Image: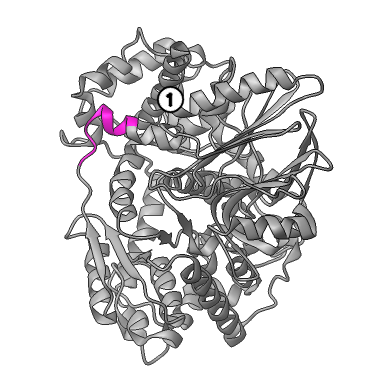
Amino acid sequence: MANFLIVVPGVNARAAAEERFRRGIQMTKLLKAQQPSGIHESDFAFVATFPRKNGSGTPVVVDAATGNWLVAVGTWFHEAGYGSGQEEQLLKRFNEVGADQLARETEGFFAIVTGHAASREVTVIVDVVGTLHCYARTIDGTVALSASSLVLAALDDVTLDAVGCQEFLQTAAMYEDRTYFNEVRKLDASRCYRYSNGILKSQHRYWHVTDLAPDSLDGEASVVAMREAMAGAARKIGAVFPRTVVDLTGGYDSRAGVAAFLDAKLPFRTAVAGLPDDPDILVSRRLADQLGLDHRHFQPGPVSTFAQLQQALELTDGECDLVDYARIYEVQSDLAARFDVSINSYSGEIGRGYGWEVLMPNTGKRTPLDSAKVALRRFVNPTYDSSVVPPQIRMNPATHFRDVIARADEGLAALPNTLQYDYCMTLMRCQRWYGRIASSTNQLWPCMSFFLLRSIIKPMLETNTRSRENSLLFRRIFLAIHPVLANEPMARGYPPLPATWKTIYRFWPLIPLYGGKVLDRLRRRFFPRRASTVTSLDSPRMRLWQDSAVQQALHPSRLLSTKLLDEEGVTRFLERSKQPEFDFSGQWSNLLSLEMTLQRLKSVKGET
């Protein structure tokens, strides 16, 4: 299922709630080009479901005997062996054990919403990472729920969230519960939310990182546990989706995803997107040839038209860089016509200690995470022009992201700082950046990240620092599953083998690689310089500026973001962005995405 709209009326507000519901369906048709596949109305909730672009997704299912109902959006798997497409079984299980236990038994990339007729409660279960984006809005004592923030924004007047908009302009993502709009909030990870009579009655966390046993797996035991979890996850996917396509690039993470499907002895295909001479593409081809895989290579065309961005906006609600997602859309649309599900390996880096250098010299110690250092190294954008924001609301990125990280890791100071770091990155990068992309692709067809399954997260995060750092866990898994996975060099020229005295000579490319990194860090510290500029006349920004519709959207007379941002600062910024040499192309794409979203929202409100 791609989307849902659920309205929970307040006391004596059924007529007003029904009116909001009808308006929400109309807004979904206009904003998302989605027609409802199922509608269910009761005295305690109005429910509508909307299929994916490829037609998949089960409409709302209702139990005639109890009046209970269930909606499942995304890609889910129950521990009993069934999954997406078998929502009737999931509803039966809900009737037996309730929402809390159902949440503990289900994993994947999903939002599951249940209605309990006897208690008149609507419960929303959000996956453990919060990857499937789900939103709530309260209007005049009535609660509206949807997988689309923009649909909820269209239900009534909204105001711009100063923090959320600044986060997006800097990083192409928003964090915690923020959206573009103060009135629309994202539901949090691993939660059960209960609504009744137009209010949120309660919420609780059904899973937390503190449930894990950190450092309990080491050496061979960690390899065995991870192999079992990965192969088991692959079998779950294969049982529900016979025609599976798995990303295969030149790096560790996609190689690990492929390793799982090979280990499970399941049929699958692989795919990669990029320029033909890109090192990642070349490595993926060699791997596929040696492993005997049916491998597809896509070379997306340039993003150069307003129409391409509008197509991306329809899926994304404008909550990610539309220029970037327009490329993704082209590839995913092609795959959706050929396969049942797309499996990528985003967040596999959690299993291999990626980014832990920021923790040195205390890597793995049970000390509080240095949130200020992590903020500077991982979230503060060095190429950001703050002149577009009025001084009175301008936030300090370093202190802002420091505080967001500290809140994400609250209560975890006694855990290894590696686990604190990985959990923080999961909640922030995996949930809000990757999750927005995945939630958008789910509007087209089923998709998910292999390494965000709870059954895989558990052994990854329970493996100790020594066995995960320098990608050692994955290196050992590759060697155990198939020698080609371990021996075929990656894009940078060295293989993902465990380093021993017999193999050390194969790692010589690391010498210039890490030597160059050290020199770069010294150069940046003692001789800071401006970021490199974009000078190509064929860059996406320069191509898009040639489109009259883009010019019209960014004309000073049409700008809507200036209700929040500094009008003169934005105008100067946009004028400078018309030149080939410009330091802030990413921020320009983000500003364009925000503007297009606001203008589209204004347009559809004017149509009704």
Please name the residue shown 59% across and 76% down the image. Answer: 466
Please name the residue shown 20% across and 41% down the image. Answer: 302
Relative height, residue 72 to residue 214 (above, below): above
Relative height, residue 267 to residue 393 (above, below): below
Magenta stretch: give its range: 302-310
Point out residue 83 in the picture as x, y percentages from the top left corner.
57, 62
Residue type of the residue flagged with mark 1: Leu
**Nearer to me, 255 or 417:** 255
Residue 219: quadrant of the picture: bottom right
Residue 505: quadrant of the picture: bottom left
Q: From the viewer's perspective, is 265 left or right of 294?
A: right
Q: Which residue is mark 1?
A: 30
Point out residue 4 in the picture as x, y percentages from the top left corner.
56, 38
Q: From the viewer's perspective, is 516 left or right of 601?
A: left
Q: Residue furthest top?
A: 557
Q: Is residue 347 visible?
A: yes
Relative height, residue 361 to residue 21 (above, below): below
Residue 528: quadrant of the picture: top left
Q: From the viewer's perspective, is 255 left or right of 368?
A: left
Please name the residue shown 76% across and 28% down the image. Answer: 198
Relative height, residue 275 to residue 544 (above, below): below
Q: From the viewer's perspective, is 557 left or right of 397?
A: left
Point out residue 347 in the picture as x, y percentages from the top left corner.
50, 59
**Nearer to me, 167 or 268:** 268
Point out residue 336 in the picture as x, y percentages from the top left corner.
34, 53
